[in-house]
Amino acid sequence: MLCVLSPPAHAQVTVEAERYTTPQLISRTLSALPNCLSYCLTGIELRMRVTLTGVRFYFVPRVKHHMAAVHLMTANQTTHEPYIEWAVIMGQVQKLMLDHFAHALGIEESGGHLTRYGQYGRHQATRFKEHAIMGHPVAIVPSLLDSSGGIQSHMPGGAFDPPTTGEYTAVVTNIVNRWSAWAVECVGQPLSCPVTQPLFPTAFLKRFFDIAAAVQSIIVGLEALQAVLNFAEMAATLRDIAAVVGGEFGVGASVRIDRLLCPNHIELFYPYYLSGPDALFWRSGWPITDADQLTTLFNPWSSDRIGSPGELWGHLYPRAGFVNHDHDAKAAIVVSERGLHLVGDSRILLRPKRTLTLTNPLWQSVSPQPTAYCTERSTDLPVRLDEAGGYGYNVWSEYRCSLSDVGTLIGFIGYSHCF
């Protein structure tokens, strides 16, 4: 095992036809910003601030919009994700864990693929997919714009400092051995496993991602978009509308805008979900996985059906990696829906994931067929097949906020204007 525990070398990665790097992920995501942002003014707030020198009133716009929040990846094996850097960093460590675990159980391999076909039915063929959900780097866009729509050039964080070979080997060997020992002990009784399983070395592996370089790519992309998405004009229009509509309050006030986009708390490149450390549940299916969803699983009219009109692609439950469908891209959509739902389920304690609430999500395809638009339904995205079994999607969450937190809210006038 130690022979393959070497740090990923970005320059030596071979880019396949439908794979993408961090700059390409950013470029494909920003290409959809004009269509997916959906920026709308929803009203004007009257806010009051009391100081030692007196009372001041402000008109503050309230808005809603979407922003890329997480990136979803499905693959037959954890090293086959379409996002290259992710596959050779997070994917490699997961594969070592899974292979070590499989070997301990007497299994030759830990990957997945089409496992059954033949006379089983036109749309029935069991497939297995690994899944990962990552905090999207483009989620940082709100902090790169000032209150007038200008693009700031500041860089977050310090210098790029990837781990050394010695650090990498020590950390990965430790997590592989500890996790495998925990998993082997729990495999007989997965529902009785202790919640305190070994933690995946997330913070350590994130050091391989050059956040400053990613932010610079985003800044360049935003500057190129100004011809079709002019944030400065949007800010000026908001000020004009706020001044006119706010005047209906009948008080003298100035317009206050401290930001143009709503802030979010997405952690860039953070693995909100990895099917590797969740192997016991991701590979088990019902009744081990989602044992409490019996009424949904055995209800032929259940609301957890996923598919296009007239065709069932799969079900939300059980939230595991096996999908009974002969179309690989449609199976990938089902798996992605399951992973996203799992991340949003705050009731789950045993399965290793970080809860994240995404409101009115929009879907964008990144690979194998990138789209410069979003859809409300994941099943409305293109379903082009990828021979390697890797698929990538962006999920854009809706955010609502006031463009300033100054003072205290004392009044609101609803007003709709979409850009």
Image (tube, rainbow, N blue to C red):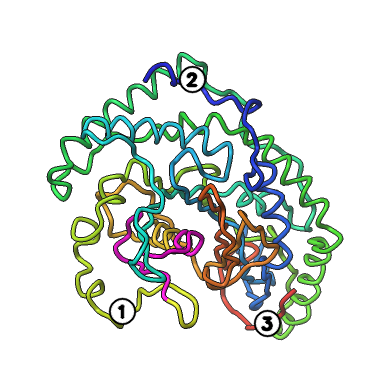
Q: Which residue is mark 1?
A: 302
Q: Is residue 327 left or right of residue 368?
A: left
- Distance of label 1 from label 2 (alpha carbons): 47 Å
Vertical relation: 190 (above or below) 147:
above
Badge 1 local density, few (<14 within 10 Å), some, or many (20+)? few
Q: Residue at x 49, y 42 (%)?
A: 270
Residue toward you, 321 or 126: 126
Query: Magenta part of the protein: which range?
Result: 312-333
- Distance of label 3 from label 1 (alpha carbons): 37 Å
Of mark 1 and mark 2, the one earlier in the sequence is: 2
Q: Is residue 241 left or right of residue 56?
A: right
Q: Which kind of residue does numbered mark 2 sit on?
A: Ser
Q: Residue at x 46, y 13 (%)?
A: 166
Corner quadrant of residue 162 = top right
Whole-percent x, y for residue 106 in the image: 22, 33
Quadrant location of the C terminus?
Answer: bottom right
Picture disc at residue 6: 2
Q: Which residue is mark 3?
A: 416
Q: Secondary structure at mark 1?
A: loop
Q: Secondary structure at mark 3?
A: strand
Q: Is residue 329 left or right of residue 344?
A: right
